[in-house]
Image: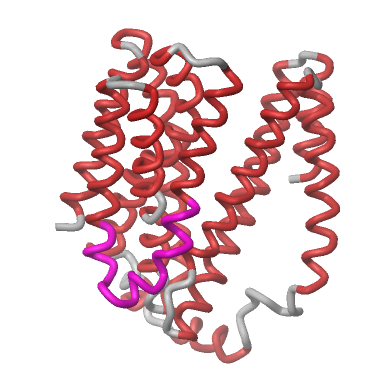
Amino acid sequence: MFSGFIALSAGALIASQIMVFAALFIFGMGAGMCNVAMNLEGTEIEYRIKKTILPVLHAMFSIGTLAGAGVGVLFIKFGLSVSLHLTIVACLLFATLLIATRYVPAGIGKDSVADKKASKEDTAADKRLWLNKRTVALAIMALCLAFVEGSANDWIPLAMVDGYNVSHSFSTVIYGVFLTGMISGRLVSGKLIDTYGRVLLLRIAVALAAIGLLLVILKISVVVCVTAIFLWGLGASLGFPMTISAAGDESQYAVRRVSLVTLAGYGASLAGPPLLGFLANYFGLLNAFYFRAYRDLCGWLVYE
């Protein structure tokens, strides 16, 4: 990840599209491996303590994104270059990882001797048990709900500029409101999920995201839009962590199930934003969000 950030900074400095492409690939590959490992470890902790904690862990991700957006606003305000911005972030990332990894216990994530022995004794039929209707349904849900979150991360600032004629700096502030909704939902949802169950909370979350998205599309006013953006973030906050948490319910198959659900989520984050961009060329960016609302409905129906 660090090397990808440094290469990205250099590519931005010399305006090399090839270097930027390669750097993003390297950074994305490192980030993907880290995310799968962290989500898998989070589901294992949930399985052991019998409490829902993955949304709170994902809230830390959203807090980091919000902090990054805030730093981006300051850099835009003071006219600092993209290359300098990326270099500073790369150095902070390296220092943080260097310090944090010192507190990770040795052997985390490694199979014990007993686990390896049990794995070898599994029959071919047992090894196929992880890929069942429930796993496929979770992967589809992760695809739909990660699309809701990922395309918001990519398109909200531009949609605010094009659809509501706000400044670039204020559009970043509005994006911060979306992240605040994400953080709020993830911080308070753990006890609610344990009390009322995943199904009810997920249905409420999908409904909030759909209502918020519809109010944004209708362009009633900037104030209503900001409120709707918060509801959108609140609703989008639970989809990805809850599907990953459900995929890790059975520790025996957690690795493969979490990997598949994560792959589906990141696949949606990769393919969704370009698809919205393609639709925006013909119908406008806000109207393209109707496709997003349809994906919200798909996520709801899969869980019915």
Picture mark count: 0
Above or below for 268 versus 105: above
Q: Find residue 148 and report its image quarter.
A: top left
- The x, y position of residue 39, in whole percent, is 53, 63
The stretch of residues the image draws in magenta is 183-202
- The x, y position of residue 108, in whole percent, is 67, 76
Above or below for 151 versus 298: above
Query: Is the stretch drawn in magenta largely helix, strand or loop?
Result: helix
Quarter of the rendering occupied by the N terminus:
top right
- The x, y position of residue 269, in whole percent, is 45, 38
Residue at the (80%, 28%) spot, across then down: 9
Residue at the (46%, 49%) spot, across then down: 182
- Is 256 colored magenta in this rendering? no
Which residue is at the far front? 223
Residue at the (25%, 31%) spot, across then down: 214
Most foreground residue, 125 or 183 = 183
Tell me: 40 left or right of 274. right
- The x, y position of residue 298, in whole percent, is 21, 43
Tell me: 83 left or right of 46. right
Most foreground residue, 32 or 87 = 87
Residue at the (49%, 35%) spot, across then down: 153
